[in-house]
């Protein structure tokens, strides 16, 4: 359907969900402004997907560029909701017909271990901070915190990202030790692809010979309960099969990257000496019918570094209503933000009950079209990469479902007046000028894309 272009919609966050929503609306003739707090609208792809996923990262970022570089979309980088304007201003004062919140989930869930926060960034590192550092610290202008990964690190987690965290630590430890002890310098891409075990064997050495203990992953359930492999269907055989494959996948990762795994452990206490973290005490649990019960058994693990990888929540911003740690929402897909009739939420910012397990048919069609158009040649050597890929596609297909009623409401509602349009154009232009953006999207992202590690090390031919 063609529109007069006189509805303006604001989208906050330009990554997977935001760019997909912007493109869908722009194709229908609506005008869209996409605001993002960063210079680059790539969200978790840029700052969370470990930097060895070169091919996937580049493809996903290119897809976002293709969507946002649409004539009906204006991009405003360096704009942070809650700081540069409130939701109330956008939804009720600036004149947008609708506001779509697509800010993802960036707040690490707090580790439930009383008193541990005093070690934050000095013994305790949260996953989002760690991944940001990991992906960017090689850049000449890097300004974030600096971490030195320690041998004997304890990782608490169990999801997809926690496997990446232990891989990252093991690769870092092995790479540094191999260089220091044997003078052999191997890049992280080769380490990730071949595996640490193979590289050590090729160089006739071992972690023991290099004096590396390695890191350990502590999980509150069993290996088979990890969310590493999806259940393919609802038949009675599907669950045991998924559990079996998960267990096997974890074993393969352990054999390849040589980390330790401790199941059924819940952190209970920490030890310290002279203000420094020295260890974590875990309580063993038993699992019956899916329920965890604490036992009397304890396990103490000496460590100076604890990494918490237990999930991310949406960041709390002023003027956005929350219900506990989650956005307060209503509507069929849990996608309408309470207190507003024109504010919607999509992507990872909608967690908990808002998550759609069964996407509607039309969402699936959108997703398969994206796969046909952009990813026909993608092959996965690593199930982890495929899992990330599936997450991105899931977010896209849910976005389609969530936009249905917004689009039909906009189609039947009165469009903006010329004055209102002019006001939005002026205010967004001012915001663009403030950060020095002249409106040329592709040039802007090309100019702001950081130096990639593979380029810095001249390794591009390897990927
Ligand atoms: C380590 C890791 C873990 C993952 N875990 C999951 C998972 O559990 N579930 C899942 O579905 N997918 C997961 N994924 C896959 C994937 O990251 C997400 O599905 C996808 O990125 C979500 O897209 P999004 O657009 O909702 O959020 P994001 O990719 O996080 O993008 C949010 C965008 O909003 C911007 N933004 C944030 N706050 C503001 C603000 N205040 N003002 C303006 N802009 C703002 C950010 O800069 C960013 O560009 C994970 C990926 C990684 C790398």
Image: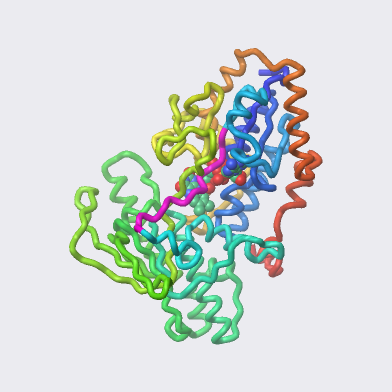
Residue at figure coordinates x 54%, y 37% from the top left: 318
- Residue at x 55% of width, y 55% of height: 49
Residue 360 rendering spot, x and y as whole percentages:
46, 29
Residue extent of the magenta highlight: 101-114
- Tell me: 4 left or right of 293: right
Q: Is residue 424 magenta?
A: no
Task: State the predominant SS element of the stretch in magenta.
Answer: loop
| Residue 145 placement (x, y as % from top left) | 59, 63
In the shown orientation, is residue 140 left or right of residue 351? right
Say which residue appears at 58% left-offset and 69% top-offset: 188
Relative horizontal placement of residue 460, taking residue 301 as reference (left or right): right
Q: Is residue 105 magenta?
A: yes
Q: Is residue 131 left or right of residue 38?
A: left
**Residue 64 drawn above or below residue 28:** below
430 vs 180, nearest the viewer: 430
In the foreground, 211 or 323: 323
Quadrant for the C terminus in the image: bottom right
- Above or below residue 334? Residue 78 is below
């Amino acid at each position: 359907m063609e529109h007069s272009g006189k509805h303006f919609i604001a989208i906050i966050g330009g990554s997977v969900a935001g760019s997909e929503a912007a493109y869908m609306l722009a194709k229908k003739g609506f005008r869209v402004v996409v605001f993002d707090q960063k210079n680059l609208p790539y969200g978790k792809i840029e700052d969370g997907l470990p930097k060895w996923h070169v091919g996937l990262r580049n493809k996903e970022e290119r897809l976002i560029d293709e969507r946002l570089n649409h004539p009906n979309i204006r991009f405003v980088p360096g704009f942070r909701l809650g700081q540069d304007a409130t939701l109330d201003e956008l939804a009720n004062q600036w004149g947008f017909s609708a506001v779509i919140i697509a800010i993802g989930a960036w707040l690490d869930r707090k580790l439930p271990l009383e008193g541990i926060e005093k070690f934050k960034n000095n013994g305790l590192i949260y996953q989002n901070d760690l991944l940001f550092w990991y992906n960017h610290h090689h850049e000449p202008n890097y300004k974030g915190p600096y971490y030195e990964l320690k041998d004997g690190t304890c990782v608490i987690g169990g999801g997809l990202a926690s496997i990446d965290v232990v891989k990252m630590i093991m690769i870092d430890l092995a790479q540094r030790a191999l260089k220091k002890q044997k003078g052999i310098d191997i890049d992280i891409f080769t380490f990730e692809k071949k595996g640490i075990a193979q590289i050590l064997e090729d160089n006739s050495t071992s972690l023991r010979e290099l004096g590396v203990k390695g890191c350990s992953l502590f999980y509150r359930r069993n290996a088979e309960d990890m969310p590493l492999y999806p259940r393919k269907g609802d038949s009675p055989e599907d669950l045991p099969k998924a559990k079996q494959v998960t267990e096997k996948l974890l074993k393969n990762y352990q054999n390849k990257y040589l980390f330790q795994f401790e199941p059924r452990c819940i952190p209970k206490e920490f030890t310290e000496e002279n203000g420094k973290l020295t260890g974590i005490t875990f309580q063993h649990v038993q699992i019956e019918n899916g329920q965890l019960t604490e036992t009397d058994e304890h396990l103490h693990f000496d460590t100076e570094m604890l990494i918490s990888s237990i999930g991310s929540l949406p960041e709390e911003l002023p003027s956005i209503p929350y219900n506990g740690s989650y956005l307060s929402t209503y509507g069929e897909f849990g996608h309408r933000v309470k207190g507003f009739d024109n504010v919607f939420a999509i992507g990872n910012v909608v967690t908990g009950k808002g998550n759609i397990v069964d996407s509607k048919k039309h969402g699936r069609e959108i997703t398969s079209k994206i796969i046909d158009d952009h990813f026909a040649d993608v092959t996965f050597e690593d199930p982890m990469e495929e899992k990330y890929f599936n997450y991105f596609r899931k977010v896209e297909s849910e976005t389609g479902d969530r936009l249905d009623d917004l689009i039909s409401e906009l189609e039947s509602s009165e469009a903006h007046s010329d004055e209102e349009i002019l006001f939005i154009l002026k205010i967004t232009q001012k915001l663009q000028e403030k950060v020095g953006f002249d409106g040329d999207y592709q040039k802007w992202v090309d100019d702001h894309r950081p130096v990639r590690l593979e380029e810095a090390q001249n390794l591009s031919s390897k990927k």
